[in-house]
Image (spheres, rainbow, N blue to C red):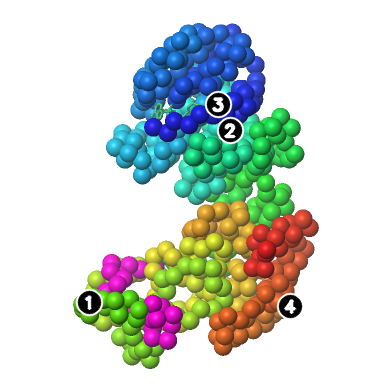
Amino acid sequence: MGVVITPLQTVEYIISRLGEIKEDQKILDPCVGPGIFVKKLLESGISKNQIITYDINSQFERVIKQLGVYFKEQDTLLALYPDSYNEFDFIVGNPPYLNKASTYVRTKKAKLRKIYGKINAHETYAMFIVNSIWRLKEGGKLGFITSDSFLTLSTHKKLRKFILNSCKINEILLAPKNLFSNQKVSTSPVIIILTKCSGLKNKKIREKNIMRIIPRINDEDEYQSPSHVNKIKQIRYYSLPFNIFYADVDEKVIELFEKAPKLEKYLMGFIGMHTHNNKKFIAAIDDTELAEVFNKRNMKMHDSKNNFKIIKRSDLENNKWKPYLKRGGADQYYRPIMEALDWSEESRKIYDIPKNAPFEQEGIVISGISSRLAARYMPRGCYWDSNKAIGFIIKNKLISIEYMLGLLNSSLYNYLAKGIINNTSSIQISGIHAIPFIEPPKEIKKKVENLVDNIIKSKEKNLEYDYTKEQKAIDNTIFEFYTNEFNLPNNLKKELDDKYSIYRN
Ligand SMILES: C[S@@+](CC[C@H](N)C(=O)[O-])C[C@H]1O[C@@H](n2cnc3c(N)ncnc32)[C@H](O)[C@@H]1O
């Protein structure tokens, strides 16, 4: 049931951030475990009868009762009655981190969905945040240590909205990565301190609230005087796409997101199709490395009926096969088409082909799964799969495919897409659409186009072509251009070179 013990200094710090606890105020630990928060609260002079604890596991009842504190065995997430709302002055703890694959979430799915479905019914820690905000009185405070994934993942957008609409965020502190590593827990943790301040009438108060945002610290000793503290008005958490709770993004970059038009005005992505049986309907093209892999596998096969299909490149011309894109990865600018889609009439009947997607048009393919933002030229005639490769079409005639490729593959855009919007390996269409875009003046456009043209031609001749020199020139040109428009800080360029460029160490 996700029992993990919170280290002492962390418990002390969370309690210290709650502010004054008066004698008549009530504090809840909703998932108390062996009671580390309770012990620290008692040590700090809080009286036993102010503390209330719950845990799903009755095993903890004895130790908590020995401390003289109230304990109730219950599933805190499911035990919600009208009188459990607005009940507590403080809620502290370390909620369990069980995801949707866990036995608990799977078996309780229907019930959890009924209560939390509109916000998030996948991870227990997210549901504990919601549950505890409901249990807090207006003006009551919450102090939790949880996984930090809800801060940025687009799947937690509704949770962030819920927090923004019901609380003042007092503090977000990215706690040391290794905090729980001696307990074999690898999620990177965050401490959040919230004050309940809900309703439309408090909207302005929430928006004006100044949050203390503390980027990742490396050691518990840094809690009291961290080297960086960003003070940000809560309204700014509405600026980034998906209401991302960022910790360390420069003001000027936020301004870029707030003021520049969105990329979707210029570039539109479309979800691809399903064959329902890729092995049956997708073939490798004979001059590619994929064909070599298929050949080797086929040699080991006993029954040739099950062979992987390989076709000649010239077969793409007779309309029985269509070029197909279904691969992610970090390749940029150009990659030869390696796969083909069976286009016979009877096969086509089986496919799910979205009607609105402009298949067969010339455009750009972006890897949906990749460690970096990777965009390549998409020739006319292609179809694409559902998430690993995403087809995009340019919407504005003033912008060329070459310019867009240079921009998307630049270190600045890799940072905007992967460093800010989504720091996992997947990239969604909505994420790409939300990136800012500034229309380039002629000379910048021309310069980038020439460099990109050269990269594509060279890669067509030699796939291993090293385009570092051209890429550096593109990265510098784009950064300078955006800096002139939005005053991006100089130290950002160093971060881009070090962390987001293809020539990083
Ligand atoms: C991460 S541990 C925290 C223990 C302790 N509070 C600490 O910080 O050291 C999570 C606790 O949540 C309890 N738990 C898990 N699911 C629960 C649920 N649905 N309702 C109540 N408690 C739950 C587990 O039994 C476990 O004791």
Closer to the eye: label 4 or 2: 2
Quadrant of ligand 1 in image: top left
Q: Is residue 244 above or below residue 333?
A: above
Verify CB contact (< 8 Å) between mark 1 and mark 4.
no
Q: Is residue 303 above or below residue 208?
A: below
Verify CB contact (< 8 Å) between mark 1 and mark 3.
no
Amino acid carrying mark 2 in the image: Ile
Verify CB contact (< 8 Å) between mark 4 and mark 2.
no
Verify CB contact (< 8 Å) between mark 2 and mark 1.
no
In magenta, the rendered stretch is 272-293
Q: What whole-number distance in Å separates the C-alpha atoms at marks 1 and 3?
A: 63 Å
Q: What whole-number distance in Å separates the C-alpha atoms at marks 4 and 2?
A: 47 Å
Q: Tell me which label, 4 or 3, sits earlier in the chain.
A: 3
Amino acid carrying mark 3 in the image: Leu
Q: Tell me which label, 1 or 4, sits earlier in the chain.
A: 1
Q: In terms of secondary structure, where does tag 2 sit?
A: strand
Q: Which mark is residue 142?
A: 3
Closer to the eye: label 1 or 4: 1
**Residue 366 at x, y = what percent?**
51, 68
Q: Which mark is residue 443?
A: 4
Side (left or right) of 169 relative to 135: right
Quadrant containing the C terminus in the rendered view = bottom right
Crowding at mark 3 (Cα within 10 Å: few <14, some 14-19, many 20+): many
Magenta span has 499?
Answer: no
